[in-house]
Image (tube, coloured by chain):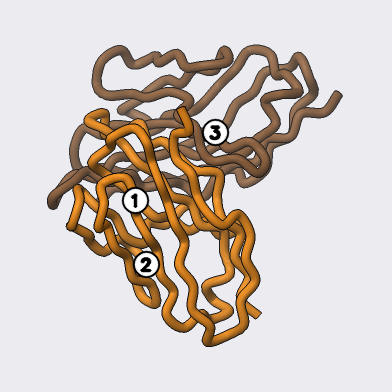
Chain colours: A brown, B orange
Amino acid sequence: AQSVTQLDSHVSVSEGTPVLLRCNYSSSYSPSLFWYVQHPNKGLQLLLKYTSAATLVKGINGFEAEFKKSETSFHLTKPSAHMSDAAEYFCVVSSYGGATNKLIFGTGTLLAVQP
Amino acid sequence: NAGVTQTPKFRVLKTGQSMTLLCAQDMNHEYMYWYRQDPGMGLRLIHYSVGEGTTAKGEVPDGYNVSRLKKQNFLLGLESAAPSQTSVYFCASRGTAFEKLFFGSGTQLSVL
């Protein structure tokens, strides 16, 4: 079975400092992994995806994530946080099988950005 | 282009009451999903549909029913609401790119 574990429920950074949101995955085969972002009172939006091509994946708004098979990790990073990055971030793994692929969501990491 | 529209946005129910949440998408997507979001638990899949006239159970289907009579609409029903169903409900749809879900803005439901 596939699963993801987001290691931090809350992360607080100062504006202009780096962001690191951690995600470990478990999968019995080569996974597809994603990060979604949810701004307050909004639906979720796809931030970036890894689907077995390049291990360093670039997403929207300056975010990127690196797939590390040896560490079973897919951490999300950004060099310099902006106030508008404050949101909840979900690490997601695909689950294959049955009539359709399904996405399995982590429990989320709430990112706060201090001025 | 409206995308995915959920109605209503907020609702308060008493225990035992019934209601239907409506999800409509205008992107001609085959796949539609209902999730519930609870603090510290991420999103959990309730039911999903792979096309008009089809539905299937997700992770947490008990207490909910769904229908997909038209391709653009996916209805989530609560026949007898319980306080445990207090949650934020999200509808999503997708086309052929299986990872790119398009989400509605959510329905906040409170069951007293």
Q: Is residue A97 visible?
A: yes
Q: Is residue A31 above or below residue A62?
A: below
Which of the chains bears the disc numbered 2? B
> Do marks 1 and 3 share a chain?
no
Question: Helix, strand, or loop for circle 3?
Answer: strand
Tell me the residue that label 1 is attached to: B73
Dot 3 amino acid type: Val
Q: Position of residue A108 (x, y in %)?
A: 55, 45
Q: Are marks 1 and 2 on the same chain?
A: yes
Q: Examine the image and state in which quarter residue A12 appears.
A: top right
Could you say where residue B36 lies in the image, as x and y percent from the top left? 48, 58
Residue pictured at 65% horizontal, 71% vertical: B12
Q: Which residue is mark 2?
A: B60
- Disc 1 and disc 3: Cα gap in Å? 25 Å
The label number, if any, that marks residue B42 in the structure image: none
Q: Amino acid at mark 1?
A: Asn
Identity of the residue drawn at 48% across and 51% down: B90
Asked if both marks, 2 and 3, belong to the same chain, the answer given is: no
> Where is residue A98 shown, x and y percent of the image?
13, 52
At horizontal 29% and vertical 55% (from top left) the residue drawn is B48
Query: What type is the residue that disc 2 sits on?
Result: Val
Report the residue marked by disc 3: A37
Q: Is residue B94 left or right of residue A77?
A: left
Q: Residues within 10 Å of mark 2 (few under 14, many from 20)?
A: few
Residue A110, given in percent of the width and then of the height, sits at 65, 41
Q: Nearer the viewer, mark 1 or mark 3?
A: 1
> Sequence order check: which comes first, mark 1 or mark 2?
2
Up the image or down, B10 lies above or below A77; here it is below
Q: Secondary structure at mark 2?
A: loop
Query: Label 1's element?
Result: strand
How far, Cα to Cα, is label 1 from label 2?
A: 21 Å
Q: Does the CB distance between marks 2 and 3 fall below 8 Å?
A: no
